[in-house]
Amino acid sequence: MLDKISFLKELREKRDKLSFSNREKDMIKRLRELYREQPEPLYDEERARLVKDIAYPSPDDRKSPSISLPTLDLDDLKERFSGYGVIATDCGLIDEKRVWPRYVFLNGAYCYLDEEAGKLSYEYLCSLKVGDDLVLGGRMATRYDVAAWLIEVEFDVGFLGAEKLGKDTILLLDRDFSSEWLRHAKKAYREVVLGALVRKLNEAKERKIVPIGITDTRAYPVVNYLIRCGMCADVESCRQCSKNSKPCELRGRIHDSCVLNGVLREWERSPEFRRMGIITSELSDMGVQIDFFYVKTKGGILRVEYPSWAKEKVDRETLHALVVYECQKGNGRYPYLMERAHEFSLVTGRDREFARRMIAKEAQLYDLWLSPKRAVKEGPFL
């Protein structure tokens, strides 16, 4: 049980840590000025690799630091992508590691607006992996294997919905295609996740489906670009930096959204960027380039990612219009269809309990092993 009095006491003592320091505020102000100036990128892969994670604006989209739509009327926005079906997918997960037999259950769901019926159409795609399914090459499945399965189910359920639509489709996923969260993982684990992502992106291309990843991110590749090309362009490499107050020391606290939130107006987008880093280099070796731009909604900044070949089918302005349309249809913060796909795929506590009971019953195991601590917390299953 939470000791609320102690919690509030701690909160009052540390409330100053909830905001930016004066140095960080000055840094954000300077970065916003640099963003408006759009410093010339250093297109030098060797120098960029030293920064680990950096994003450069695409040369053909550097028209302005902020790009707005000609109209925000819903009917006009919808007309921009009227030739495409739009589907959103998501996937819920149960990964039981402390129960024998261990199992992983993935609950994928898609939804789209059925124009003729005037209501949402949805369907599920479930995948259960249990026992030997979780033994891969003589080892137990890791969280990276589970991450790869999530990717496969999210795309597969989207392909299922696209077949029902029967036309070219834009597929919305709550997924970071850049996968920079993998940069600290072992190469073998990165290959598992990136391999699944590349296979599904290529399959989407064959099926004439345009996959779009939309996330609320805390990454800072654009901040790295502004620091490296605007503040530190005279430094050959970070190792040779002799600045007394190094601007890169603050980047962990200052992410892209902090900068763009004060530059973009509501429903405007940034120029297109291409990320350069460990993961994007490996994706490039596999034949996939990921581009992205940011959009400001009522709730903050969203990152919209897509493989570079997607622009051959859908231009950036159409994707911009689609994101704004979907957000305005919902609460103004996040695409409406993606909200509903999340609701359909969500695995609740009751769902988890039901799954555990049914597996116990089917396996005729009436005493599933739990850790002593968890057994006390949860009690018997049957």
Image: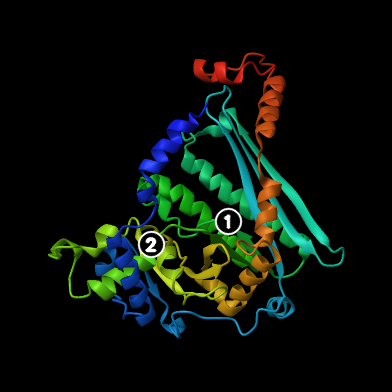
Residue drawn at 40 percent across, 62 percent down: 280
Q: Is residue 149 above or below residue 159?
A: above
Residue under label 1, please give it.
174
Residue drawn at 12 percent across, 65 percent down: 242
Q: Is residue 157 left or right of residue 370?
A: right
- Horizontal and vertical percent for residue 145? 50, 42
Query: Is the C-beta separation of discs 2 and 1 under 8 Å?
Result: no
Residue drawn at 53 percent across, 20 percent down: 374
Q: Is residue 201 above or below residue 357?
A: below
Q: Is residue 184 above or below residue 258?
A: above
- The mark nearer the N terminus, 2 or 1, is 1
Residue under label 2, please give it.
220
Secondary element under disc 1, as helix, strand or loop, is loop
Circle number at residue 283: none
- Horizontal and vertical percent for residue 113? 77, 63
Depth check, mark 2 against mark 1: the one in front is 2
| Colour theme | rainbow
Three-letter code for the amino acid on which mark 2 is drawn = Tyr
